[in-house]
Image (cartoon, rainbow, N blue to C red):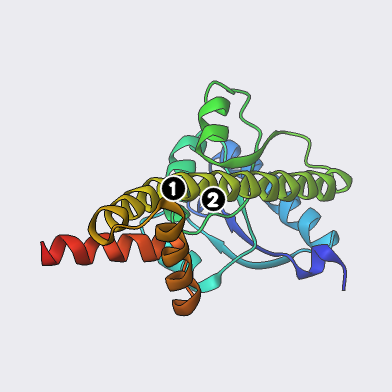
């Protein structure tokens, strides 16, 4: 199984059936959407659903658990993106937007909101796989940076809490700084918790007991 075959995609696209019979613009967009889906299938991607960008999108994505979201939009791209960003706020996923809309005024906002790739035109099948590969790589890199930043924040917060707990032990139990730290560390090892978690529990207990 190739990486593309194991990648589960959800496409977010407007319903064009109503105007397709009389509206040439709708027909052109429908054909572009068809070519995009054909290109994805020809490259071996697994399209698990095509969904509208509506208020039910959060629940549908939570149920389907796709690996990547493809936004197929034109003039309504901004509205679609708002729905997608809101629907993925708790479980981030790479988002790739394909559009023929030459108005790129909101590209910066789209990227800032979490879009991994913003593709204007150029839906030839041979371009699709490298676009999605780069989008996935960029998403994974950004997720790694977010995890590192979160770890740094936790470490800084833990350090402050540990210092407070050490000071309390030194004052209340007449311990040296090293002895207070060793006591916290032993408690953390015994309970299988982070040092910061043990320190916070100790502070909470001290506040409760006065």
- Image point 47% across, 78% down: which residue? 190
Q: For mark 2, does the 10 Å Cα neighbourhood hold few (<14), some (14 to 19), or many (20 or more) residues?
A: few
Quarter containing the N terminus: bottom right
Q: Earlier in the sequence, mark 2 or mark 1?
A: 2
- Image point 78% across, 44% down: which residue? 134
| Residue 159: assigned label | 1
Q: Quadrant of residue 209?
A: bottom left
Q: Where is residue 181 in the image (x, y as percent from the top left)?
A: 44, 58
Relative placement, left or right, of 177 versus 128 is: left
Q: Where is residue 28 in the image (x, y as percent from the top left)?
A: 65, 40
- Label 2 vs label 1: CA separation? 12 Å
Q: For mark 1, does the 10 Å Cα neighbourhood hold few (<14), some (14 to 19), or many (20 or more) residues?
A: some
Q: Where is residue 43 in the image (x, y as percent from the top left)?
A: 85, 59
Is residue 57 in sight in this rendering? no
2 or 1: mark nearer the eye: 1
Relative placement, left or right, of 164 versus 122 is: left
Q: Where is residue 75 in the image (x, y as percent from the top left)?
A: 52, 33
- Image point 79% across, 50% down: which residue? 133
Name the element at disc 2.
helix
Name the element at disc 1.
helix
| Above or below, comparing residue 119 to residue 129 in the picture | above
Relative placement, left or right, of 25 versus 63 is: right
In the orientation shown, which residue stands out farthest toward the left? Answer: 210
Is residue 185 in sight in this rendering? yes
| Above or below, comparing residue 69 to residue 145 in the picture | below
**Between 37 and 67, the one nearer to me in the picture:** 67
In the orientation shown, which residue stands out farthest toward the bottom? Answer: 190
- Image point 32% across, 55% down: which residue? 165
Relative placement, left or right, of 14 versus 1 is: left
Which residue, given by chain and number where applicable, does mark 2 sit on? 151
């Amino acid at each position: 199984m190739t990486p593309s075959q194991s990648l589960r995609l959800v496409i977010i696209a407007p319903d064009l059936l109503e105007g397709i019979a009389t509206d040439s613009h709708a027909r052109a967009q429908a054909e572009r959407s068809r070519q995009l889906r054909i290109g994805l299938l020809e490259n071996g991607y697994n399209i698990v659903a095509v969904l509208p960008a509506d208020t039910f999108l959060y629940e549908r994505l939570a149920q389907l658990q796709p690996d990547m979201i493809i936004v197929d939009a034109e003039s309504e791209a901004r509205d679609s993106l708002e729905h997608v960003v809101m629907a993925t706020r708790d479980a981030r996923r790479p988002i790739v937007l394909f559009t023929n809309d030459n108005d790129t005024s909101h590209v910066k906002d789209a990227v800032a909101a979490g879009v991994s790739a913003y593709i204007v035109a150029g839906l030839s099948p041979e371009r699709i796989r490298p676009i999605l590969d780069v989008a996935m790589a960029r998403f994974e890199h950004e997720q790694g940076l977010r995890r590192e930043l979160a770890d740094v924040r936790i470490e800084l917060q833990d350090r402050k809490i540990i210092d407070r707990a050490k000071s309390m032990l030194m004052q209340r139990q007449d311990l040296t700084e090293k002895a207070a730290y060793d006591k916290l560390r032993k408690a953390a090892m015994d309970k299988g918790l982070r040092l910061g978690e043990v320190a916070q529990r100790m502070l909470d207990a001290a506040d409760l007991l006065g």
